[in-house]
Amino acid sequence: MHPVVRGAGALGLAAVLATATAACESGSGSGAAKSGPSTASAAPTTPAATASAGAGVPPLPAALTGQRLDWQPCPAPSTAQGGDGTAPGAPWECATLKAPLDYGKPDGQTVDLALIRAVATGTGTGTGGQPRIGSLIYNFGGPGGSGVVTLPALAKDYADLNTRYDLVSFDPRGVGNSAAVRCLDDAATDASAAVDGTPDDQAEVTALDAAGTGFTAACERNSGAVLPYVDTVSAARDLDLMRQVLGDAKLHYFGISYGTELGGVYAHQYPGNVGHLVMDGVVDPTKDPVQNALSQTKGFQLALENFMKACAAQAGPSCPTGRGGDEGTRRITDLLASLDSAPLPTDGPRVLTQDLAVTGIAAALYNQNSWNALSVGLQEAMQNRTGTTLLALADAYSGRDQQGHYSNQSPANRAISCADDRSRYTATDVQGLLPAFRQASPVFGDFTAWGLTSCTGWPVRGSADLPEVSAPGSAPIVVIGNTGDPATPYEGAGAMARQLGAGVGVQVTLQGQGHGGYDSGNACLKQAVDQYLLADQVPAEGTTCG
């Protein structure tokens, strides 16, 4: 199980790390959410503008574009979705949207997409509040994260936006309650995670290859019919169908992490349908999987070094990584080397392996609020020789609850990534790349490099070398880059803004830590984004918040 996959890693951003921190501090687990029924008959109350079908796509039948969603109170989440196992309650409503399984055959088989919303409160400033703008649709990343679970978990950060927008999110195709990709069962997933992900000899290479082959075979056996159709282009077309059914003339969208790639692909397919579009924690659309993985490796090493500096400044000699820098990195690599042959016990029946420790460390670097949990976890492992906290962080990242049930975020991540990316890498390829990855990070290099083999042998051919995101004619799109972002390094925001096109991509910089920016609590950044979304005031190019 490799901690850094695709451009998005953190499935649900702060929601995942909040779950991890809760698991460390209170022992709480994770569970999941489900959408209600829908019909495909009457037209929406507010007609949407006629839209292009997207490049080379036949127009959709009225039975789909005119369906009326049957919003109902949300039930408790499903295991596939993850979450804490409780229904979100008011004001949240859930529904199901029908979309074509294959957009090349719009009158053919359909797939059910799970949606969630909180209607606009109408409490904006001014007498009687401000008028509703429309729906603001969120994708929180992954790929593989359940928006139905994540949006309620983070909704307090979007309360001001909820005054004039219906807040809407969804489980993308292949995810959660939207035709979830299913591969191994829980016990087999645990067994697969126990295989050494950074092989040291040919026997371990063979074992890793066998584990990958077994995972792929299980995915094909259990979800073969949906695997060809979980690509990002199809998900972008789902967004436009969603826009029409929700009754919006333009799409208003907030994409985070992988959600920025989805937003870019949407803007390329439907530039004339873009209303307000925010990208936060931006995937670099110009880098192939090796380049992206190497960039992430450097990003996580930088984030780790920033954590170690802060730890040394706050805790002095008691910091588990000492003075940081080379000393701190050495302490961590020594710990990981020891775990390779002698995993640590935890407060349960499982042990902390080398792979799980790296996953836990990476997970905590997504959000500065989790740095304390990382410090606790490293101190436990280095001094007490126990792995409970790092295991809890790793489990939250991997979507495993305390009952041993996994959400489908990891299988969905693999399926969507492999449907999108044409590249396939072998063990021989990785062995040639290892020196560069190890130089980028002694902690994360091997793990990220070996993760490149994830799509080897996948039954679906990847659709492209790079995503198409150029969007000439689109309305301005706000692109946020965080200088301390580990999973989507800062330079990706500039690359995305340039690829969107002159006059379209508008870059805003946050000088901060963690993955993404809007949820960081930075008032300057929040104001810039809110003025764009609520008052149609596009930030000045190069706006910087510290």
Image (cartoon, rainbow, N blue to C red):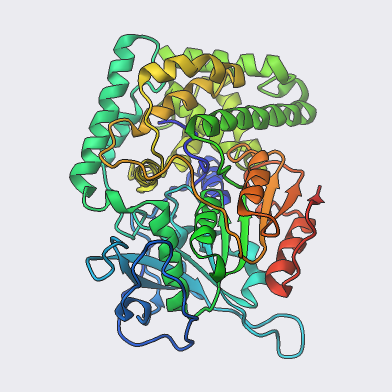
Q: Position of residue 364 (x, y in %)?
A: 58, 37
Say which quarter of the image contains residue 170: bottom left
Q: At 38% across and 55% down in the image, what residue appears?
A: 81
Q: Residue furthest top?
A: 201
Q: At 43% across and 65% down in the image, what residue appears?
A: 54
Q: At 76% across and 90% down in the image, what residue appears?
A: 127
Q: Position of residue 119 (x, y in %)?
A: 54, 78
Q: At 53% across and 57% down in the image, what residue appears?
A: 263
In the image: residue 421, left or right of residue 488: left
Task: Residue 225: tell me if it is visible.
Answer: yes
Q: Position of residue 447 (x, y in %)?
A: 47, 24
In the image: residue 100, left or right of residue 27: left
In the image: residue 32, left or right of residue 315: left
Which residue is at the front of the view, 541 or 210?
A: 541
Give above or below for 357 relative to 131. above
Say which quarter of the image contains residue 100: bottom left
Which residue is at the front of the view, 454 or 22?
A: 454
Say which quarter of the image contains residue 55: bottom left
Give above or below for 489 relative to 35. above
Count the marks: how many? 0
Q: Residue furthest left?
A: 221
